[in-house]
Image (cartoon, rainbow, N blue to C red):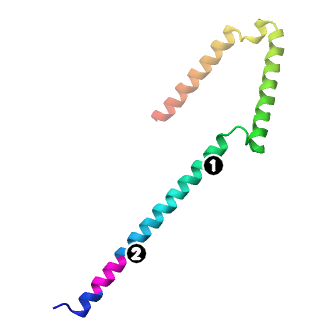
Amino acid sequence: AVTRSYVRLRTWVHKKLRFKKLRKQRLLKKAEEANKKQEQERMQTQQPGQLNRASIKNRMDLVQSLKAISQANECSKNVPTSQNKPSYETFESQTKMVSLSTYESSKSVVK
């Protein structure tokens, strides 16, 4: 004999499972749509004809900075090489300073 409470329970479980299934399908559909949108946006940004203003401005800034760097390099090429390169003594003293500072810091870490 099937009682009324058992029938109610069975219909309630069936309803819950159906809603769970529908919710899962809805979430999967949303995820697929989001992936499609991202793919379309990616395809649009890759097309060279459709550059937005920000990327053009960034490229112009990059070109200007590269020009400035190359001009600075050209100016330094005219100067004799002895002034451009640091002498051996200064390099040696710098390395001693670095090694001393690392030695001091390692001593403080040990303490």
Residue at horizontal 50 percent and vertical 30 percent from the top: 106
Which of 103/4 is in front? 4
Q: In which quarter of the image is residue 93?
A: top right
Q: Please report the residue visible at 38 percent of the width from the left and 70 percent of the height from the top.
A: 21
Instruction: Give residue 77's position: percent from left, percent from top.
Output: 80, 11
In the image, is 23 to the left or to the right of 4?
right
- The residue wearing badge 2 is 19
Estimate the x, y position of residue 107 in percent, counting from the top left: 49, 30
Question: In this picture, is 9 found above or below 55?
Answer: below
Q: What residue type is labelled 1?
A: Glu
Q: Are marks 1 and 2 in contact (CB under 8 Å)?
A: no
Q: Which amino acid does label 2 sit on?
A: Phe
Confirm whether the magenta stretch covers residue 15.
yes
Q: What stretch is highlighted in magenta?
A: 9-16
Query: In percent of the image, x 77 and y 39: which residue is there?
Result: 56
CA distance for labels 1 and 2: 33 Å
Find residue 102 and report its horizontal and vertical position in percent: 55, 26
**Secondary structure under the numbered disc 1 in the rendered image:** helix
Crowd around label 1: few <14 · some 14–19 · many ≥20 (10 Å): few
Secondary-structure class at tag 2: helix
Disc with the residue nearer the chain's start (1 vs 2): 2
Q: Where is residue 30 in the image (x, y as percent from the top left)?
A: 51, 62
Left or right relative to 70: residue 96? left
Task: Report the residue marked by disc 1.
Answer: 41
Asked which quadrant contains residue 10, the reply is bottom left
Front-lying residue, 107 or 57: 57
